[in-house]
Image (spheres, rainbow, N blue to C red):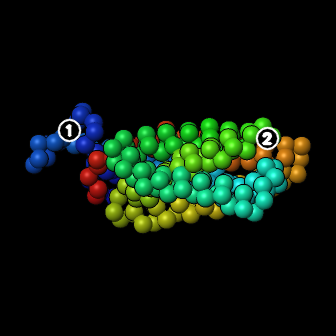
Amino acid sequence: MTGWNGYLTSERRSDTRPMASGMTIQIIVVDPIWIHSFASLLATGVQGGYYTLASWLPTYLKKSRELDVVGTGGYLFILISGAFMGYVSGGILADKLGRKRTMQLFASLSVVFMVCYTQVPDGANTLVMLLGFPLGFCTSAIFSGFGSFLSELYPSEYRGTGQGFTYNFGRALGAVFPTIVGFMASTALGLGGAMIFGAVGYVIAVIALFGLPETAGIELK
């Protein structure tokens, strides 16, 4: 079965058909509106959280943590090192644990580390520095399997269009997150408190993943 009518997966066992390899497969009905909606929500949350971190972190380190240029650069180097390791590891884990489980894991951890990073008490900058590595790791590891997951949600006739639409829809809405943080930073929350709004993006991503199918191991059509 092709087009919007369905795709094949090797995970479920009811209503199965035999394959030459001996594996069994099942046809799953896919509602394109459902897929579009939750995939767009996922892309919005992941990119909204990431854009918040990338846009405001240098200012947070300079203004809220009172670091000089050298100190800010050093803290960012640690976070970027974690991000590099996250990119490398995220793809491996997406193949081993599944796309959904891996992204839900790292999105959940991103919430935890983002809140912890921005709410460290004054005078505990060493803790901020140490938290930079796992924060960078988790927020970047999500993207390693992100493109694969979006493309696997769609049949070949619509794969490029579907992936391109949902990713860039999320990019457009995600770009609003740093703007909202900027407005919130001018209130009593301050920049550190306002940056928690970026963590909301990752909460949205976790919720959106519950509405999407696992695609690891499927036979693409």
Q: Residue at x 45, y 66 (%)?
A: 161
Percent across and percent down for residue 185 are 83, 50
Could you tell which of marks 1 and 2 lies nearer the N-terminus?
1
Residue 31 image label: none
Question: Can residue 47 be spotted in the picture?
Answer: no
C-beta proximity under 8 Å, tags 1 and 2: no
Q: Amino acid at mark 2?
A: Gly
Residue 123 image label: 2
* Image side of residue 216 versus residue 168, left or right: left
Residue closer to the observer: 3 or 58: 58
Q: Residues within 10 Å of mark 2 (few under 14, many from 20)?
A: few
Q: Residue at x 49, y 39 (%)?
A: 105
* Vertical side of 39 occupied by 70: above or below: below
Residue 16 image label: 1
Separation of marks 1 and 2 at Cα, in angstroms: 61 Å
Q: Residue at x 53, y 49 (%)?
A: 137
User: Element at badge 1?
Assistant: strand
**For residue 59, which quarter of the picture?**
bottom right
* Image side of residue 25 versus residue 101, left or right: left
Judged by depth in the image, the label closer to the viewer, 1 or 2, is 2
Residue closer to the observer: 197 or 161: 197
Question: Can residue 189 be spotted in the picture?
Answer: yes
Residue closer to the observer: 120 or 158: 120
User: Element at badge 2?
Assistant: loop
Percent across and percent down for residue 149 are 41, 53
| Image quadrant in which the C terminus is located | bottom left
Q: Amino acid at mark 1?
A: Thr
